[in-house]
Image (cartoon, helix red, strand yellow):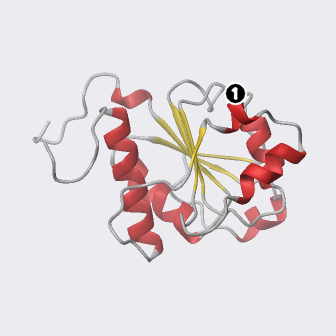
Amino acid sequence: MAHGLLPPGAGNRTLVAVFASPVADHLLHFGRDIGYRTVLLEPDSNRLADAEWRYADQVATAAHEDFVDREADIVVTDHDRSELGAVLRHLLTLPGRWIGVMGSPRHTAPHVEALRRLGVPDRVITRIHRPIGLNIGSRTPPEIAIATLAGLIADRNRRPGGFVF
């Protein structure tokens, strides 16, 4: 492992960054480097025209089971988008392994109310993680992406993250 080889089966992982943003760009960049197949999901095709997606192996305007499978980790990178509820409601119908929404724990989670307004039951809403990533005090898009990916690695490996072994 320390010699740069991915563990068996690691090549099937997919990272879906939802909404084009600076954090999504870094997630896709670093995600590809650590062995994820990367997907940028941006439902607004106008935003896609201006987006940086050179690190995306695939770009989509709607989620599909061909990339949101049981090995897919989904990270919503903008919790202020008007289509947040609708996008999450659709993602919750797919078999993704993990869904998280970026946001500070000091602020309300807008996705919860958006999903309730759309009739999504609370037991389904609890599949969504927030806050996400390891608590390393990240502030910049690259730091947030690193913290998020470190949290996903820890979760996949059933580890708590941090310095306790």
Report whether 6 appears left or right of 90.
left
Above or below 154: residue 102: below
Q: Position of residue 42 (x, y in %)?
A: 73, 54
Furthest-left residue in this view = 3
Above or below 160: residue 12: above
Mark 1: secondary structure: loop
Residue drawn at (44%, 77%), measured in percent from left and top? 140
- Callout 1 amino acid: Leu
Report whether 3 appears left or right of 70.
left
Name the residue tied to disc 1: 94
Residue drawn at (63%, 32%), measured in percent from left and top? 68
Quarter the N terminus occupies: top left
Q: Position of residue 147 (x, y in %)?
A: 37, 59
Report whether 56 appears left or right of 110.
left
Q: Position of residue 161 (x, y in %)?
A: 27, 48
How crowded is the residue under tag 1: few (<14 C-alpha within 10 Å), some, or many (20+)? Answer: some
Q: Position of residue 94 (x, y in %)?
A: 69, 27
Counting the numbered discs, the total is 1
Residue drawn at (42%, 50%), measured in percent from left and top? 31
58 or 65, which is in the foreground?
65
Furthest-bottom residue in this view = 140
Can you tell which quarter of the image residue 137 is in?
Answer: bottom left
Can you tell which quarter of the image residue 44 is in?
Answer: bottom right
Can you tell which quarter of the image residue 96 is in?
Answer: top right
Quarter the C terminus occupies: top left
137 or 5, which is in the foreground?
137
Above or below 104: residue 1: above
82 or 113, which is in the foreground?
113
